[in-house]
Image: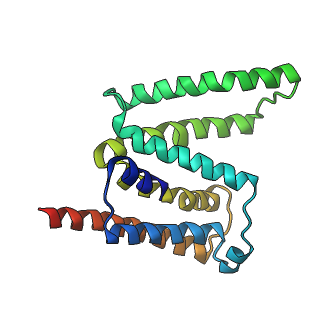
Amino acid sequence: VFVLLGAFLVSGTRISGLQAFGVLVTLVGVIVVAVEGDVSRLLQLVFNHGDILMLVGTTFYAGFAVFLKEKPQVPGLAFFGALAVCALIAALPLAAFEAATGTLQWPTPKGWAIVAYISLFPSFLAQLLFIRGVELMGPGRAGVFINLVPVFAALFAVVLLQEPIAFYHIAAMVLVLGGIWLAERGKVVEALGRS
């Protein structure tokens, strides 16, 4: 939603009614996963400090996605490499502080495996594909696919952590994929209407 709003505010990217409905359906799917299929949990919803930080992070990521269209005309890998170097430089003072205060903790072997997985797939491969997706279809359309993240996180929990699959997992997957299909169909219908 933040990416679509940002694309509209920054570059005037229009959203058709069917696209907006598709995005709404994907959000319902995300909510189904978040509340584990128990709608009554929404009545107990309270924002804590971490939730506010996530909203701030989401806003910044939406800005990143919207302004990817304006990135320098360099390959995605080179652009990603430059971002990674900036992130490393930004993290060094914090690591130095932890080392100086004796609070630096090195990962266990299992922790290193998790770091390797996160570095390779969500941080590297997924970001390169997202950068390419924004190049091909724009931030508004590419941003809708971010709603797959909580669904895949739940599926990975089932596959990798042997958590039981529940009806709400399946319902959320159907809602998110159906919403993406509707949003993409709305874009096609809008394009046909202009031609």
Residue depicted at 52% across the width and 45% down the height: 61
Residue depicted at 32% across the width and 52% down the height: 12
In the rendered picture of this protein, how many numbered marks are placed on residues?
A: 0
Nearest to the observer: residue 144 or residue 168 = 144
Give percent across and percent down for residue 114: 66, 40
Taking the view exactly as shown, the residue that stands out farthest to the bottom is 40
| Residue 64 falls left or right of residue 158 | left
| Residue 151 falls left or right of residue 49 | left
Identify the image quadrant of residue 186: bottom left
| Residue 33 falls left or right of residue 195 | right
Task: Work out which quarter of the rendered image holds the C terminus and state it.
Answer: bottom left
| Residue 4 in the image: above or below residue 114 | below
Residue depicted at 40% across the width and 72% down the height: 21
| Residue 166 in the image: above or below residue 78 | below
Taking the view exactly as shown, the residue that stands out farthest to the left is 195
Give percent across and percent down for residue 162: 67, 61
Identify the image quadrant of residue 23: bottom left
Nearest to the observer: residue 144 or residue 160 = 144
